[in-house]
């Protein structure tokens, strides 16, 4: 199937010029402008990558309560709500399973929010009420432009700025499981100063026992036009939450009659306090070229308690991060052709303090209390160029030199260790514009991912494994985007991602065979097809997508096995309709096929069942806002989005919520 579709697409590429002439329509479709794919503004039709944009209108119309729920409708993106309370999510691009969050780079206004440890991305930091639009670039192309964590793609969440007309907005919602949420925002421009301030509060008891959450957020964006040449920027945010963790339920526990809503971890919790501050400037050398630089500081404190098969684990982790990113953007002629040149440098320093207490009930001598200091300095030097050879053909390429310097100190034992990793990355792409901003493209990228700080660390024996290496990937993509006069929009992307030394958690690894982080002794191969399209028919907007994954481990201990946590088939369907100009109805469905349980690299434990998740939202538009009711899991399907193997090797499930309801109102002044 994969090879046949590849041949069809290559045939279209060869026939491109005659196809473009014969099908030339009279109407011009507006071209979307995105910033994530090239780290500067660029028309979507000129980018040799698979890109999806969630617009402000789509954000407003969605029944989603948060950003991960918005991403469910994006082709090639697998979202799992682990606890069923909207607090802890995994978001996976291109089939990385358990390490999806470590291979997907997430940005907020260009600022990375991936942590330097295994916690990855905390999606609770970005309330939906702050979101203006979201850009998703699938594939490894972003590795050259952004560095770490971008092997499978980049998600850039662009927040609201102050508009010329002063505005104030607010929203309230309440629903099942004693859920309540309120938000308020103000924004505007005063004497060349743009101001946007947002606050958000959310509380819920959650679907399951011990899954309650209380979260508070505050954020601001300031931009000041000093002159026509100089723009100053300042942004900051604060997040605080207290979350209970219901944990998984083993197959034997469910068979004994325990309810899907119960927990066997009544005392587990995780409390988070997180803040950041970012300042920067943009200086225009002329109307098309500029210099930009930003400095950001972030501090995150995380306290948790967890019960596991052998005992309990109590931890306090503090991470401080400082980053500096200058870049120069030049729009000039190169070899007689129009060119966009990007030169830049990224530096990020992260320091992590870990206090942990392990209590092994069955083996008291293994119990310990320890204190560690880890640090990481990441350096990245990069350059990228886009050249328009003709009105229709553009080529692009870039390279990055990356270095990671790691230090580890065991304060109790008075020991230390260190590790330095160097990698060179590069990308090359070609784009052929057809008509109406339609295009064909192909690209190749070599990417890498360095281990995060506590991936080097073994919690079972408090040791550091400096033998871990960086993983490297070769990513080949070909695709097409069509925008027709009839209003039909269609895209097709084929990809093959081959990874060497992939970093993963081996359940049979580690010092005592209880699990440890390792590099695969074989390669991992991910290939697949992404299809998406939309069309308005009789004032009904229909859109949908289908993704096919083929994942395989090639060589080593798990040769020939499927990669856990990745469905072979995945699809979405959306229907939007407006009645009498004021009533909006939306239906959104997501299908996720069967997939192996997390950590089942031997493929011996069967598969997690497939599911179809349907949401609906009915809104009544007011002159200055709206009121709405939303229903999640409309078909009341019994399913689990996430499933793992326990330490004993038994299947364990994270049951997902049954049918539930939300009513709300939003106001604008």
Image (cartoon, rainbow, N blue to C red):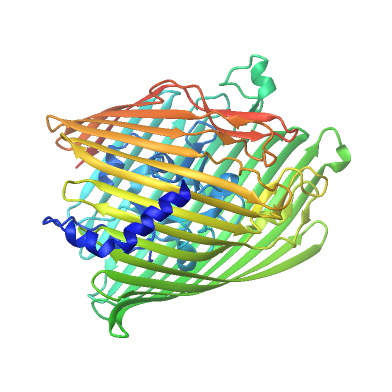
Q: Where is residue 510 in the image (x, y as percent from the top left)?
A: 78, 49
Residue drawn at (55%, 44%), measured in percent from left and top?
A: 272
Q: Looking at the image, is 485 positioned above or below residue 379?
A: above
In the picture as drawn, the residue positioned furthest to the right comes out as 365
In the picture as drawn, the residue positioned furthest to the bottom comes out as 335
Left or right, 417 with respect to 82, comes to: right
Which is nearer the eye, 392 or 159?
A: 392
Q: Position of residue 591 (x, y in %)?
A: 43, 33
Q: Where is residue 303 in the image (x, y as percent from the top left)?
A: 62, 44
Q: In this figure, what is the number of numbered marks?
A: 0
Q: Where is residue 509 in the image (x, y as percent from the top left)?
A: 77, 47
Residue 16 visible to an observer of this rendering: yes
Residue drawn at (47%, 65%), measured in percent from left and top?
A: 444
In the picture as drawn, the residue positioned furthest to the top comes out as 257
Q: Quadrant of residue 616?
A: top left
Residue drawn at (85%, 42%), measured in percent from left and top?
A: 366
Left or right, 50 with respect to 584, comes to: right
Residue 137 visible to an observer of this rendering: no
Left or right, 252 with respect to 430, comes to: right
Q: Looking at the image, is 515 positioned above or below residue 245?
A: below
Q: Quadrant of the C terminus?
A: top left
Residue drawn at (23%, 77%), measured in percent from left and top?
A: 287
């Amino acid at each position: 199937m994969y090879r046949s579709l590849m041949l069809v697409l290559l045939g279209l590429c060869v026939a491109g010029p005659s196809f473009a002439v014969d099908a030339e329509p009279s109407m011009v479709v507006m071209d979307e402008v995105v910033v994530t794919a090239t780290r500067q503004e660029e028309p979507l039709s000129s980018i040799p990558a698979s890109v999806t944009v969630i617009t402000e209108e789509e954000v407003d119309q969605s029944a989603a309560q948060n950003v991960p729920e918005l991403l469910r409708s994006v082709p090639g993106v697998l979202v799992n709500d682990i606890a069923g309370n909207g607090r802890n999510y995994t978001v996976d691009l291109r089939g990385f399973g358990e390490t999806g969050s470590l291979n997907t780079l997430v940005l907020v206004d260009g600022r990375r929010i991936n942590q330097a440890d295994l916690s990855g991305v905390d999606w609770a930091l970005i309330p939906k009420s702050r979101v203006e639009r979201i850009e998703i670039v699938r594939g490894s192309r972003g590795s050259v432009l952004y560095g770490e964590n971008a092997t499978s793609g980049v998600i850039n969440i662009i927040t609201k700025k102050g508009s010329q007309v002063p505005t104030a907005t607010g929203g309230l919602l309440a629903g099942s499981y004693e859920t309540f949420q309120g938000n308020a925002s103000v924004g505007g421009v005063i004497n060349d100063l743009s101001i946007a301030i947002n606050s958000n509060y959310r509380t819920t008891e959650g679907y399951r026992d011990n899954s309650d959450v209380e979260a508070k957020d505050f954020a601001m964006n300031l931009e000041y036009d000093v002159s026509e040449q100089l723009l100053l920027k300042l942004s900051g945010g604060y997040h605080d939450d207290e979350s209970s963790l219901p944990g998984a339920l083993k197959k034997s526990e469910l068979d004994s009659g325990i309810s899907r809503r119960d927990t066997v971890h009544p005392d587990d919790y995780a409390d988070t306090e997180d803040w950041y501050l970012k300042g920067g400037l943009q200086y225009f050398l002329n109307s098309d070229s500029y210099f930009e630089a930003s400095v950001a500081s972030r501090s995150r404190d995380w306290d948790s308690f967890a019960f596991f098969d052998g005992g309990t684990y109590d931890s306090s982790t503090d991470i401080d991060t400082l980053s500096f990113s200058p870049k120069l953007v030049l729009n000039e002629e190169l070899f007689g052709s129009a060119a966009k040149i990007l030169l830049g440098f990224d530096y990020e320093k992260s320091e992590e303090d870990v206090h942990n207490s392990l209590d092994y009930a069955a083996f008291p001598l293994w119990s310990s209390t320890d204190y560690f200091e880890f640090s990481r300095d990441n350096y990245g030097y990069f350059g990228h160029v886009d050249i328009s050879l003709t009105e229709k053909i553009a080529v692009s390429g870039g390279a990055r030199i990356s270095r990671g310097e790691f230090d580890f100190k065991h304060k109790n034992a008075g020991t230390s260790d260190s590790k330095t990793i160097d990698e060179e990355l590069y990308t090359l792409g070609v784009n052929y514009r057809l008509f109406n901003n339609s295009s064909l493209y192909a690209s190749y990228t070599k990417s890498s991912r360095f281990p995060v700080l506590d991936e080097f660390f073994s919690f079972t024996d408090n040791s550091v494994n400096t033998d871990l290496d960086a993983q490297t990937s070769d990513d080949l993509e070909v695709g097409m985007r069509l925008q027709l006069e009839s209003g039909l929009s269609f895209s097709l992307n084929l990809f093959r991602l081959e990874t060497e030394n992939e970093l993963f958690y081996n359940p049979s690894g580690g010092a005592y065979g209880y699990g440890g982080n390792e590099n695969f002794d074989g390669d991992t191969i991910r290939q697949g097809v992404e299809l998406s399209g939309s069309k308005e028919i009789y004032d009904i907007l229909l859109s949908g997508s289908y993704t096919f994954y083929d994942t395989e481990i090639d060589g080593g201990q798990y040769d020939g096995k499927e990669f856990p946590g990745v469905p072979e088939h995945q699809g979405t369907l959306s229907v939007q309709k407006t009645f009498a100009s004021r009533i909006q109805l939306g239906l959104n469905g997501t299908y996720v096929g069967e997939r192996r349980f997390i950590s089942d690299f031997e493929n011996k434990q069967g598969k997690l069942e497939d599911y179809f998740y349907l949401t609906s939202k009915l809104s009544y538009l007011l002159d200055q806002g709206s009121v709405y009711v939303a229903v999640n899991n409309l078909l009341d399907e019994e399913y689990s989005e996430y499933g793992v193997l326990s330490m004993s090797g038994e299947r364990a499930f994270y049951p997902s919520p049954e049918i539930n309801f939300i009513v709300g109102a939003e106001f604008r002044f």
